Image: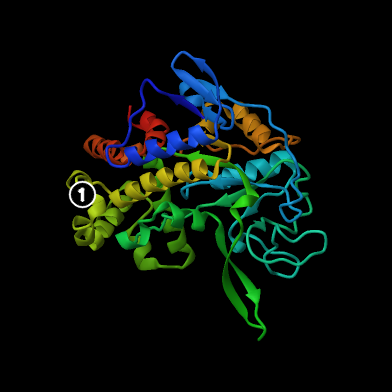
Amino acid sequence: MIMNTSNAKPSTILGGLYLLMMLSFLAGFFLLSEWEGNIFRLSTFTSLQLKEGIMESEEDRFVDDSSLRGSLPLAWLMSFPNSGTSYTITMVKKVTGRNTASNYGSESRGDDGMSASVLAHNGTAAEGPPFWINPTSLTLSRPSKGFILTKTHCGSRCNNCSVSKYVENHALFLQHCLEGRYNIIDHNGQLTEKLGSYEKALVKRAVHLIRDPFDNVVSRFHLHYKNLVKKNKIDHIAAYPRTREGFRRFCYDMGKLYYSEEEHSKIYTDVFDTVKNVPCHADFYRYIQWHNLAFTTTLDMRVPSMIVHYENYTDNFNRTKDTLLAFLGQEGVYNAPEFVTGKTYRDYYTADEINAVSVLFSKLALEETWLNTKHYFV
């Protein structure tokens, strides 16, 4: 991790807790490797900060830890939904010719029609997450070294939901990072959904994706619209078209639905009046909380983490790709798929609304979240 101590901005609400965790964590685990002016490097954290022209990487030994049930260790791909997960997974698979994994069984179908668990190896039977994505692919082999990139959205990410559904603490967030749903055939021959989880000891690295919060929130609406189309919800599609106006109308209706609960919720103390008229303001709260908890989780687990901003794929694609592959201990063999640029939606918001969201971040974001998102408000 690269931390700039000259412009760090602690959270006014949660900063004390974060600082205490950081200090105890550094004292107990990290060794300060070197100072460079006001920047210091921690040898176990790799950070990709192309926005500021900074990139640091390290040489690591990639070991097949056979104690982990015979599987290679996992590298989480941690993302608040719609922040570049699909492209990152696809790019790694295409470039390396190696498969990746997911916590979610719906993304995995083996020869028997069931989800193919990563933990099943050498002829042993296993069920539960994580699962190989596209396990029957004839063009992908399974990684033989390094880390298995594994998709997880963790928790605190519901869409169009009440406050009680998305407020989480660190322990619950970690639990969600380690679990996923999948289908099995029960003893009656019926298809049954199960919720499974795995040990956090399997996770040895984390790739943390971050996208412009305004683009991220609008993209989540686009996913909602896509699901409406799939379900042929004609009335909803007409009410909320995939346009700026449709987005703002959707956010307005959701805001009315949960207005009273938010107004009286302690989590919105001191910020509700500021953001209550911002379209889909609750999604910005969820965004901030998600990244706060993601940073806290990887620090607590003491795993090396790599931060990838979505715009890195546009600003410096090759360096982003190569550094990510090195972090995963994988080799690039094939050409990367094209990254489609231009998915920006800042114009869906007014200048006053953007300023209100900036105030929300200044009050709720932990230091590390703010350091990695403040350039979106310049």
Q: Looking at the image, which residue sits at the far right? A: 122
x and y percentages locating residue 39 in the rendered image: 47, 19
Residue 362, position in %: x, y? 29, 36
Q: Is residue 91 visible?
A: yes
Q: Residue furthest top?
A: 37
Label 1 neighbour load within 10 Å: few <14, some 14-19, many 20+: few
> Residue placed farthest to the front in the image?
28
**Relative to residue 154, is residue 194 depicted above or below?**
below
The quarter in which the C terminus is drawn is: top left
The residue lying toward the viewer, choosing from 226 and 12, is 12
Residue 162 found in image quarter: bottom left
According to the image, label 1 marks what residue? 269
Between 351 and 162, the residue placed more toward the observer is: 162
Residue at x-position 39% and y-position 54%: 169
Count the labels in the image: 1
- Is residue 145 toward the left or the right of residue 301 in the image? right
Which amino acid, by three-letter code, is at mark 1? Answer: Thr
Vertical comparison of 35 with 201: above or below: above
Residue 30: percent from the left, percent from the top?
A: 55, 31
Q: Secondary structure at mark 1?
A: loop
Q: Residue at x 45, y 68 (%)?
A: 232
Taking the image as shown, residue 338 lies to the left or right of residue 235, namely right
